[in-house]
Each structure stands twice: as structure tokens, then as C-alpha cells.
Amino acid sequence: AAAPLIDRLLSVTFDSAPLWRIGAADMRQSDQRSSPILHARAGRVALAAANLPSSVRAKWGDRIQIIAPNTPPIDPRDALVIYTLTPVRAWGRFVRVEVSADERLARRPDQAPAHYAAATAYYLMKLDDEWVIVAWESWVT
């Protein structure tokens, strides 16, 4: 049941697809973000995928580097944005989907790694067979 939600979140993050419809009148004037805020233009991207549904992995695996739990460590000085999806949480007709970004800046071997982090979580409600956004939260460092 989570696969379509995860697929949509990846489409929003990587393809600039539109978000779900906003379902709360008081949110219409809010600043809407499609993915975590980055400090530089995203170049090389990867997806940390500990529990990615197989259908989603098959669809996105050719386009995005998927980092499995057993993948050898990546040099923290390599320029890379690693996106991570938090497991979808559901209660009643509500779900929470979240994507975070670990933005690693290019550094020389003699320099310390430099990172930024950000995340966006969407709270969705099933309304007339459609998921709509009823709240969201974001943070960035």
C-alpha cells in the first residue's frame, strides 16, 4: 500500500512532479516545497533504500543510484546528495511520508567533510479516494 505513495514522493523529489492537492483551506497561502532545500544545485544523487518496495526499486533503479544497507561506504568528501525515505506511517485515513537529504559538498582529501541536511514531511488524508495534503513540516541545517 505504501509503494504508490513512495513512488509519488520520488517523482516530486527527482522529476519536479506536482505535490498532492492541498486539502486544507488555511494552507493555501503557505510556502510549498516539493523536496528538501539544498544549498547548491543537485548534481550526483543517490537514494538510501533500506526498505524500498521492489516495484519502486525496479522503476527508479536505472535512473538513480540506490544505496543498499550492504553498499560499501561512500567517501564523505565526494559531492553527492543522498535522499532517504522514512517508512510510511499510517493511522486510519492518514499517512505521513518524509524525504530527507544529506547534502555532501566536494572537498579535497586534506579537508574535513562538509555536509548539510534537510527534510520535508507530508501528512496526507484519504479524501474521496484521493490523497490530499493536510499538513507538512520542513527543516534545514
Image: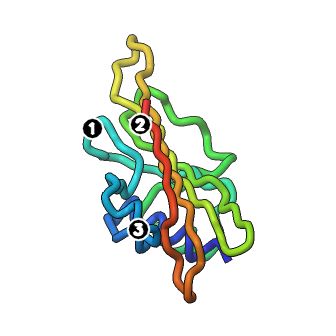
Mark 3, residue position: 25
User: Residue 22: horizontal and vertical position, in percent?
Assistant: 42, 70
Q: Residue at x 34, y 19 (%)?
A: 108
* Quarter of the rendering containing residue 52: bottom right
Q: Residue at x 58, y 35 (%)?
A: 73
User: Residue 127: horizontal and vertical position, in percent?
Assistant: 56, 82
Mark 2, residue position: 103
Q: What element does badge 1 sit on?
A: loop
Residue type, mark 1 in image = Ala
Image position of 9 with respect to 39: above or below = below
- Outermost residue toward the top in this view: 110
Q: How crowded is mark 3: few (under 14 residues within 10 Å), some or many (20 or more)?
A: few
* Quarter of the rendering containing residue 26: bottom left
Which callout, 3 or 2, points to the residue nearer the camera?
A: 3
Is 69 placed left or right of 19 in the picture? right
Q: Which residue is drawn at 48% across and 49% down?
A: 120
Give the mark nearest the N terminus, 1 or 2: 1
Q: How far apart are marks 3 and 1 (CA)?
A: 33 Å
Viewer-proximal residue, 108 or 8? 8
Q: Distance between the residues labelled 3 and 2?
A: 33 Å
Mark 1, residue position: 40
Residue 43 seen in this snapshot: yes
Residue type, mark 3 in image = Ala
Q: How is the image coloured?
A: rainbow
In the picture, the quarter occupied by the N terminus is bottom right
Give the mark nearest the N terminus, 3 or 2: 3
Q: Which residue is drawn at 52% across and 83% down?
A: 130
* Quarter of the rendering containing residue 141: top left
Q: Distance between the residues labelled 1 and 2?
A: 9 Å
Which callout, 3 or 1, points to the residue nearer the camera?
A: 3
User: Residue 109: horizontal and vertical position, in percent?
Assistant: 40, 17
